[in-house]
DNA sequence: TTTTTAGTTCTGCTAATATTGAACTAAAAA
DNA sequence: TTTTTAGTTCAATATTAGCAGAACTAAAAA
C-alpha cells in the first residue's frame, strides 16, 4: 500500500467533506481512502496502516461503514482476509436511500403542520408548501433518474 | 409562552431529526420550537424559557442559526426586543443552497477521478457516472422546481 | 497441539463540544 | 442620573465522542 503525499492530501480533503455531512473522522478517512487508493480493495491492516489507525478505531470505523452500506467486502479463495471496497458501484442505491429520508422529513413536518393553530396562515401555508414539494420530489426523482439513464445510452 | 406536553414532545422529536443532520442540540431545539410554537415569533427570553436554556446557550444557538440563515427576526416599533422566527417562509432559498452544495461534491469527486490510475476501469466508470449524474441533477433540479411551481397554480 | 491470523471487545484517556453562571455592555426608560 | 432591558462575552465546568492499547477470540495453519 503506497500512497503519495498528493493521495494523502486528497484523502484529508475528502475526509473533511464527509465530516461536514455528519460522519465521524475515522470512518470519513476510510471512505475517502477507498475512493482515492489506486488499489480499490484493501484489507483491514492495509487500511489501518494507511491511515495510522489503531485496531479498535479501524474495526469500529469499518463496521459502522458496513452497516451504513457505504462499503462492502469481498473474499478470495484460500485467503482469510476480507478485502474492503467502496460501494460507489452501488451509488444508485445510495441515491434512493436519500430520497427515502426525504419521506421521513415530510412526515415529520406534516405532523407539525397538523397540530398548528389555524391563525398563523402564512406560516402554515409555507409549511404546507414544503411538505407538498418534498412529496413531489419523492415522486419526481425516479423520473429524473430514468430520464438521465435514457440520455446516457 | 405556553407549550403543552404534546408540543414539548414534538419539539424533542424534531430536535433529534435536526441533530441527525449535524446540528447541535440547542440550535436544533430552537429551530424546532420556532416551527411548533403556536406563536411563530418569539423573543430571546421566551425561547430561553421555553427550552430552559441559559442566556449564553440561547445566545450562541440563536446567533449560529442567524448566520446559517435558518432563522430571522423582526422588530416592532417602540419595542427593543427582537422577535425571532423560522425561515421556513424562505424554504426555496434553502433548497437552492442545497443544490449549490452538490456542485462542490461533484468537483471533489471529479478531482478524485482525475488522479486515479486507468486500470481500475469499472470503479472509475462508476465514479464518472456519479459525477455526471450530480451535474445532471444540478441542471435538472431548477426545471423540476419550475414544473412544480407550474403545477401549483 | 501450538501458533498465527484477522479481527473484536473492553477499559480508560484525551480532546472537542456544549452548557452554565457571572460579569459586562450599550441603549432606552424612568 | 440611575435603572432596566436585551442581550453578549468570558472563564470554568460537564458531557460526549473518538481513539488507543491491551486483552481476548475463533478459525485456520503449521
Image (cartoon, coloured by chain):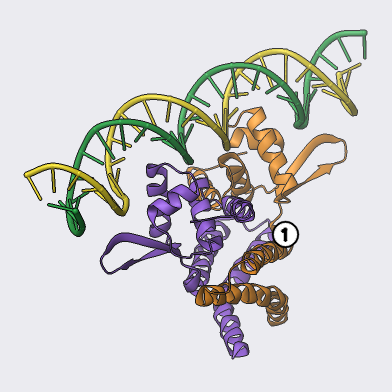
Chain colours: A orange, B purple, C green, D yellow
Q: Is residue B110 visible?
A: no
Q: Nearer the viewer, residue B151 or D8?
A: D8
Residue B80, given in percent of the width and then of the height, sits at 27, 60
At 69% from the left and 62% from the top, the residue drawn is A104
Residue A137's place in the image compared with A79, above or below, is below
Callout 1: helix, strand or loop? helix
| C12 relative position to B34: left or right | right
Instruction: Give the number of callouts.
Output: 1
Q: Is residue A65 visible?
A: yes
| A76 relative position to A110: left or right | right
At 25% from the left and 66% from the top, the residue drawn is B78
Q: Quadrant of residue B121?
A: bottom right
| C25 relative position to A138: left or right | left
Residue A137's place in the image compared with A115, above or below, is below
Q: Give me the chain letter of mark 1.
A: A
Residue B103, given in percent of the width and then of the height, sits at 51, 67
Residue A38, given in percent of the width and then of the height, sits at 62, 49
Mark 1 — residue? Answer: A89
Instruction: Check disc 1: other Cα within 10 Å, few if <14, some if 14-19, many if 20+.
Output: some
Residue C3, given in percent of the width and then of the height, sits at 81, 13
Q: Nearer the viewer, residue A41 or B78?
A: B78
Point out the image quarter for the C terminus of chain B: bottom right
Amino acid at each position: 500500500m503506497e500512497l503519495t503525499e498528493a493521495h494523502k492530501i486528497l484523502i484529508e480533503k475528502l475526509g473533511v467533506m464527509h465530516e461536514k455531512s455528519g460522519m465521524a473522522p475515522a470512518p470519513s478517512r476510510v471512505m475517502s481512502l477507498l475512493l482515492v487508493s489506486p488499489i480499490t480493495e484493501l484489507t483491514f491492516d492495509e487500511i489501518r496502516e494507511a491511515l495510522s489507525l489503531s485496531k479498535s478505531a479501524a474495526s469500529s470505523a469499518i463496521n459502522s461503514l458496513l452497516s451504513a452500506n457505504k462499503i462492502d467486502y469481498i473474499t478470495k479463495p484460500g485467503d482469510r482476509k476480507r478485502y474492503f471496497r467502496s460501494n460507489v458501484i452501488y451509488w444508485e442505491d445510495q441515491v434512493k436511500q436519500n430520497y427515502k429520508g426525504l419521506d421521513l422529513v415530510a412526515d415529520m413536518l406534516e405532523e407539525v403542520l397538523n397540530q398548528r393553530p389555524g391563525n398563523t396562515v402564512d406560516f402554515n401555508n409555507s409549511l404546507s408548501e414544503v411538505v407538498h414539494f418534498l412529496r413531489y420530489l419523492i415522486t419526481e426523482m425516479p423520473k429524473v433518474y430514468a430520464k438521465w439513464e435514457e440520455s446516457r445510452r
